[in-house]
Image (cartoon, rainbow, N blue to C red):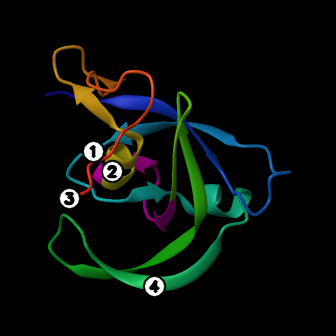
Amino acid sequence: MGVVKTLIKLSNPQFPEIHPLEIECLVVTGVLHLCITESQAIQLKLNEFEKRPVTLADGIVHQIPSVGPIKIDWQGRVSFSAAMVLGNQCLLGAIPMEDMDIMIHPARQCVIANPLHPNIPASVAY
């Protein structure tokens, strides 16, 4: 599978007067969380509430700022989350994707709404 990117809107629900950021992000199912840049965190006035140990691809554990709350909007499907401040590109990970009930379409190499729930996101609770 190739590189998959999608547009999302990020906003701070604590400051609705701040204009949302529309960002092209890399969709990475091997990443769990939303990762944003330091500049994006500053623009949205997100509060750091902890440093979290995160193992990166180099196998080394780094202390990464976790900020929030952040609202993630993909085509009207919304997730509220924290975000890791990391790197120079926004990464959309598996947890917010599950929360918004979206997935990667491998043949088209794009993000789509779950075909089982095309109109509204759904969840499973056992």
Question: Image height check: is 59 above or below 78?
Answer: below
Query: Quick one: label 2 or label 3, which is nearer the N terminus?
Result: 2
Mark sitting earlier along the chain (4/2): 4
Report crowding for label 4: few under 14, some 14 to 19, many 20 or more residues within 10 A (C-alpha). some
Q: CA distance from mark 4 to mark 2?
A: 18 Å
Quarter residue 27 falls in: top left
> Label 1, label 4: how many angstroms apart (C-alpha)?
22 Å
Calculate the distance from the C-alpha at mark 3 to the C-alpha at mark 4: 31 Å
Q: From the image, tell me which residue sits under label 4.
A: 51
Q: Which residues are magenta?
A: 81-94
Task: Say which element carries label 3.
Answer: loop
Looking at the image, is mark 1 or mark 4 earlier in the sequence?
1
Asked if the residues shown at circle 1 and circle 2 are in contact, with their CB atoms under 8 angstroms apart, the answer is: yes
Which numbered disc, 3 or 4, marks the residue that appears first in the sequence?
4
Q: Secondary structure at mark 2?
A: loop
Report the Cα–Cα distance between label 2 and label 3: 23 Å
Q: Residue at x 41, y 41 (%)?
A: 100
> What residue did someone put label 2 on?
93
Q: Quadrant of residue 49?
A: bottom right
Specify whether residue 83 is painted magenta. yes
Which mark is on residue 126? 3
Is disc 3 in contact with disc 4, using a CB cutoff of under 8 Å?
A: no
Task: Point out residue 79 in the picture as x, y percentages from the top left corner.
Answer: 50, 49
User: Looking at this view, is 120 or 108 the one in front?
Assistant: 120
Of badges 1 and 3, the one in the foreground is 3
Q: Is residue 67 above or below residue 10?
A: below
Q: Which mark is residue 28?
A: 1
